[in-house]
């Protein structure tokens, strides 16, 4: 019999790619999503890629009663992968309460409802933002965490502390917090990818929208950082590599292979690319020219972030396999398909 996994936020960007990998690894998937930043069309897209339409419940995890009900209905599930959260950094600075409410209520309701129903395995979507401005590079899991610049980032840091308290209080419960660096890219089929609503905040969707003619010009936020070309350096990771790491992590919990009741892993490639590297690679992969202009720094940006990938390699046996050019070409393929669909 297939093991059932509940995926909160499974209609979103990283969630949908993870659902595909779970299905391909013979798991049964139930998606819980309120579609606040996604659409039900994702289910069709997942079906196109895998031939399977996962079970879906349109629920807001902030609602405790509804969350309890759905976990009772799926109390045969073996674990939860929790993606559901709001994630727009700038908006979180404007509307912190919205972010603290959504990201904490959904986490707390999930934890309570699942543990009441004997579902004791939990994977959490964290972020490299918990490291703040790192003092040493590459960033290992032993680097101190710092209060992140934004309320969004702070929800990730505090969520990890909540998980620490909860796993200590509940012996049966195990959790893995995966700290993503910069996820970009899309499924190789071009059928599924990131769907930013409104003006994208992140670099990659902004670039593909410029190339598609949806936006006019990329503003490069500063070229006076202490890096090789003055633009900030990030560890971009292909979303499919990231999705595969979730499957490995949930299997680790299901096999009871974890060494501690709460483990943390960085998910990155270990390589750093500057904003200009990304622009230049995009231009060479797509044989096009991007319209961009250097402007002021963006508040909260740190000069350089890249992961040490040793721990994930040693304990999970996972390393990212896809290169920057794959990340870019798959993002571009997805953007083009999306534009063709809307014609
Ligand atoms: P996304 O917005 O595409 O997906 C999140 C999904 O959760 C959406 O489908 C949304 O509708 C759903 N959701 C939000 N609040 C909900 C609620 N109260 N009840 C039910 N569903 C709800 O985001 P993503 O990029 O796929 O990110 C997934 C997770 O990874 C998030 O927790 C995010 O903070 C984290 N993360 C993302 C990045 C990134 O760059 N994308 C980096 C680090 C961490
Ligand atoms: C951002 C968030 C981070 C979050 C992550 C994933 C901030 C300060 N950080 O990371 O908390 O976990 O997204 O959602 O928002 N850039 C431009 N022009 C643009 C967009 C981006 O020059 O229009 C540059 C940025 O200055 C940065 C790099 O591109 O140096 C990557 O930016 P982005 O994709 O937004 O990711 P992060 O800032 O690393």
Image (cartoon, rainbow, N blue to C red):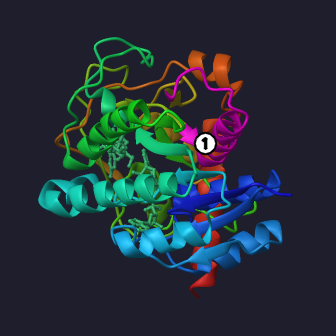
Percent of width and height locating residue 120: 56, 45
SS majority, magenta: helix
Against 36, residue 140 (above or below) is above
Identity of the residue drawn at 74% across and 75% down = 53
Instruction: Between residue 176 and residue 226, name the one nearer to us.
Output: 176
Identity of the residue drawn at 56% across and 51% down = 81
Percent of width and height locating residue 271: 53, 24
Farthest residue in the top direction? 136
Q: Could you say which quadrant of the image residue 26 lies in?
A: bottom right
Image quadrant holding the C terminus, namely bottom right
* Residue 231 in view here: no
* Residue 203 in view here: yes
Identity of the residue drawn at 37% across and 19% down = 228
Q: Which residues are magenta?
A: 237-262
Count of numbered labels shown in the rendering: 1
Q: Residues within 10 Å of mark 1 (few under 14, many from 20)?
A: many
Q: Could you say which quadrant of the image residue 105 lies in?
A: bottom left
Instruction: Between residue 240 and residue 285, name the one nearer to us.
Output: 240
Give the labeled residue for mark 1: 242
Image quadrant holding the N terminus, namely bottom right
Identity of the residue drawn at 48% across and 26% down = 272
Percent of width and height locating residue 38: 48, 73
In the image: residue 30, left or right of residue 134: right
Against 139, residue 320 (above or below) is below
Instruction: Between residue 153 and residue 28, name the one nearer to us.
Output: 28
Percent of width and height locating residue 263: 50, 27
């Amino acid at each position: 019999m297939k093991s059932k996994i509940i995926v909160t936020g499974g209609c979103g960007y990283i969630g949908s790619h993870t659902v595909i990998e779970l299905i391909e690894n013979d798991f049964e998937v139930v998606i819980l999503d309120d579609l606040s930043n996604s659409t039900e069309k994702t289910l069709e897209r997942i079906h196109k890629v895998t031939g399977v339409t996962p079970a879906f419940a349109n629920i807001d995890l902030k609602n405790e009663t509804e969350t309890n009900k759905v976990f009772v209905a799926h109390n045969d599930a073996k674990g939860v992968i929790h993606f559901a959260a709001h994630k727009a950094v700038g908006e979180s600075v404007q509307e912190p309460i919205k972010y603290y409410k959504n990201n904490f209520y959904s986490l707390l309701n999930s934890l309570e409802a699942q543990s009441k129903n004997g579902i004791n395995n939990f994977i959490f979507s964290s972020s490299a933002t918990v490291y703040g401005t790192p003092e040493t590079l590459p960033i290992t899991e032993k680097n101190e965490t710092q209060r992140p610049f934004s309320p969004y980032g702070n929800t990730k840091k505090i969520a990890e502390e909540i998980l620490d308290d909860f796993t200590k209080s509940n012996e049966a419960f195990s959790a893995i917090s995966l700290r993503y660096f910069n996820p970009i890219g899309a499924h190789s089929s071009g059928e599924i990818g990131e769907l930013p609503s409104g003006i994208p905040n992140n670099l990659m969707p902004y670039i593909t929208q410029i190339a598609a003619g949806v936006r006019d010009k990329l503003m490069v936020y500063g070229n006076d950082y202490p890096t090789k070309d003055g633009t900030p350096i990030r560890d971009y990771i292909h979303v499919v590599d990231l999705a595969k790491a979730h499957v490995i992590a949930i299997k680790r919990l299901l096999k009871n292979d974890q060494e501690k009741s709460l483990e943390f892993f960085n998910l990155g490639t270990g390589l750093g690319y500057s904003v200009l590297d990304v622009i230049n690679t995009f231009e060479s992969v797509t044989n096009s020219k991007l319209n961009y202009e250097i402007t002021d720094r963006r508040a909260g940006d740190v000069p350089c972030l890249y992961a040490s990938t040793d721990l994930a390699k040693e304990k999970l046996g996972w390393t990212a396999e896809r290169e920057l050019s794959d990340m870019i070409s798959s993002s571009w393929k997805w953007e083009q398909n999306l534009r063709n669909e809307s014609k």
